[in-house]
Image (cartoon, rainbow, N blue to C red):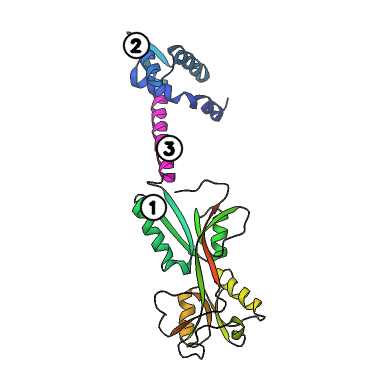
Amino acid sequence: MTYDSLSAQVAPHLPLLAALRKTGNVTRAAELLGVPQPTVSRRLAALADALGAPLTVPDGRGIRLTRAANLLAEAAERGLAALDTGVRLAREEVSPESGHVVLGFLHLLGRSLVPSLLRGHRARYPGVRFTLVQGSRQEMVDRLVGGEVDLALLAPLPSVPALASAGLVDEEILLSVPAAHPLAGRRSVRVSELADEEFVLLEQGYGVRTLTDELCAAAGFTPRIAFEGQESDTVRGLVAAGLGVALLPRFGPGSPAGVAEVPLSPRPYRTIGLAWRAEEPMTP
């Protein structure tokens, strides 16, 4: 018999050895384990047979573990302690009071939505720990499917069979132009009017880039690309420098320096939502 197969036979009896070492008595060990005394005696005999050596010797009105049994019992206690720690950590990991959540989200959402959601969650569950991961929409979808993140805030919502999602909020998309641009003072602008403009875009894989391409295609043109970037702040900075126009969500209560935000007509919106793996229970 190999050590692996012997260990597999011994493992179920580790609590018995630990109880016998603690009590020194079969009856008290049975009470500690919550099983009948004959069951303890049978398990003890089966374990001794598997090991090929006696595990107990009489000691007055009780029993005493042999040296071999003591060595095994010490290992059993260490193993059970490690298992208890593992069970505790596993329960904490999924507990709404003290769990750990890896949250992925788009760069554009880090300014206001993510801080607002985390503030509300922490008020209810102050013991939950968050690891925050930012990236493009496609990167977040890939990481979510691959199990690298637990939840992801995405826009638009993914249509991936492995994922489930729920919408949270609709966000308006505006035209961002240099403050001195002829369109800066308009009450609204149609996307078709932008056919001759140069665009500053987020790279492929970002949700706003996909939406920009779709809006331009619906208006009958492909955007002329002046620059591509990975951060919305970079895109806005290039717009402020007069290097192009962009379609972006609203910056905040006021427009960023050097940039005018103009509503589009008709007004486009994107849905921001929470996505998770469909076949797994959500962590808190």
258 is higher (above) or lower (below) than 66 = below
125 is higher (above) or lower (below) than 44 = below
Name the residue carrying label 2. Answer: 62
Magenta segment, which residues? 70-98
Instruction: Find residue 91 and report its image quarter.
Output: top left
- The answer to whether residue 54 is left or right of residue 64 is right
Marks 1/3: CA–CA distance: 18 Å
- Residue at left 39%, top 58%? 118
Tag count in the figure? 3
Q: Which of pointers 1 and 2 indicates the residue nearer the eye?
A: 1
Say if the magenta span includes residue 263: no
Residue 178 point in image, percent of width and height: 48, 87
Q: Which of pointers 2 and 3 indicates the residue nearer the eye?
A: 3
Instruction: Find residue 161 and report its image quarter.
Output: bottom right
268 is higher (above) or lower (below) than 238 = above
Can residue 253 be seen here? The reply is: yes
Marks 1/2: CA–CA distance: 50 Å
Q: Which amino acid is tagged 2?
A: Gly
> Which disc is residue 87 wearing?
3
Residue 8 point in image, percent of width and height: 53, 28
Say if the magenta span includes residue 95: yes
Name the residue carrying label 1. Answer: 129
Q: Are marks 1 and 2 in contact (CB under 8 Å)?
A: no
The quadrant the N terminus occupies is top right
Secondary element type, mark 3: helix
Q: Does label 1 or label 2 sit earlier along the sequence?
A: 2
Q: Residue furthest right?
A: 220
